[in-house]
Amino acid sequence: MRKTELLIPAGSLDVLKTAVVYGADAVYIGGEAFGLRAKAKNFSNEEMSQGIAFAHERGAKVYVTANILAHNRDLPGVEEYFKELKEIGPDALIISDPGVFAIAKKILPEVEIHISTQANNTNYGTYLFWYGLGAKRVVSARELSLEEICQIRSQIPEDMEIESFIHGAMCISYSGRCLLSNYFTGRDANQGACTHPCRWKYAVVEETRPGEYMPVYENERGTFLFNSKDLCMIEHIPELLASGIDSFKIEGRMKTALYVATVARTYRKAIDDYQKDPALYQSNMEWYKEEIGKCTHREFTTGFYFGRPDKDAQIYSSSTYAKEYTYLGTVEDVDGEGRCRIEQKNKFSVGETIEVMKPDGRNLAAQVRGIFDEKGNARESAPHPREKLWVDLDQETGVYDILRRREP
């Protein structure tokens, strides 16, 4: 069995640290240019350097996305950007455009290049093409089944790596190449500015009846035609490991630290449990399923892994997420007297019972005994986002513990 990497997304330096602490073998991030998440916070060069140092100190890697489909105007900037990255030293670049690939090979020949799913990698011939040009890894298209991935593994060199998405949002378009956003709003998904029109509500208009909108009925609320369920493969770790995939990739560079910690910790434990003892993995299945449901998500599907999705892979009634827990903050410091310091993310109050989520897998119920601002003034509640607060709990906390509250 090949050594398998758990690859986690991060949209900020704080989330990168969370991903590493909660079990990531590698983290993928975007810089301030040339990635496909223009609305994510993304990393300055200084933050990128700090994140890489933090990850390397803990044995993890950092990959930087530069996976836009470039226009002529982009190429000079790409060259300058890669010169900056040469000084920063990421472990790999994630690229989809052949022109960008050529620039990376010229300027950063020592850095691994991974070919983005955006390049539509659906067959072993494509893998061999990129391998011949010097790519180390190819990210498989989401449209591939496990059977097809196994066939690719059998046809490519042993030292070439396969990376595949195993959890997160599914795009309705072929490997992410959507034109709807650009058509409707002028914001190009292939330039990092997708408005996610697949989640919108649609009606039918007949050409000779302009302005007359006819709903596409699935129920009394209408239909969300393109609204896929989220991918979740937590129940299929054995099949994934047997397929020859080298890197298990989680989607979500715009997600919160709570989402990242929850998904990273759950998949880390599932992978480790199975490799230790398949019976242990099966015995813990209900825990995995319960935990993975605690982060914000849509209903789950296995995508294309076991054949083409049917009508049950869509959500027709709404485009909203299920949200069982609210993120309150990540512990940044402790004072040794039972209090922890957080940057508050959502409101909570003295007297509430919340949950302390720990990297080692424990979830501890904790009562909020007190809330204090940085000057030591007592508060009854914490209503202001991003305020630095000291929280007194009846449970011991450590740095990188996450505070969350279960919703009724």
Image (cartoon, rainbow, N blue to C red):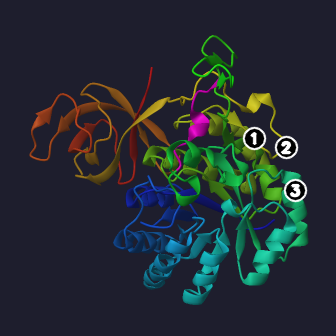
* Left or right: where 275 falls relative to 24: right
Category of crowding for the residue at label 2, using alpha-carbon neighbours closer than 10 angstroms: few (below 14), some (14–19), many (at least 20)? few
Q: Amino acid at mark 1?
A: Thr
Q: Residue at x 58, y 34 (%)?
A: 199
| Disc 1 and disc 3 in contact, CB within 8 angstroms | no
Query: Which numbered tag is attached to residue 369?
Result: none
Residue matched to label 2: 306
Q: Is residue 16 above or below residue 270?
A: below
The majority secondary structure of the magenta stretch comes to loop
User: Hey, which residue is sitting farthest front in the picture?
Assistant: 208
Q: Which residue shows up at 59% across the image and 57% down it?
A: 190
Q: Which comes sooner in the sequence, label 3 or label 2?
A: 3
Label 2 sits on a secondary structure element that is: loop
Which quarter of the figure has residue 118? bottom right
143 is within the stretch colored magenta: no
Q: What is the magenta range?
A: 194-203
Q: Are marks 1 and 2 in contact (CB under 8 Å)?
A: yes
Mark closer to the chain start, 1 or 3:
3
- Report if residue 390 is visible in the image: yes
Q: Which residue is mark 3?
A: 148
Choose between 71 and 137: the one closer to the eye.
71
Outermost residue on the top side: it is 220
Left or right of 281 on screen, residue 291:
left
Q: The residue under label 2 is which amino acid type?
A: Phe
Q: CA distance from mark 1 to mark 2?
A: 7 Å
Residue 337 placed where, x, y %?
22, 47
Mark linked to residue 302: 1
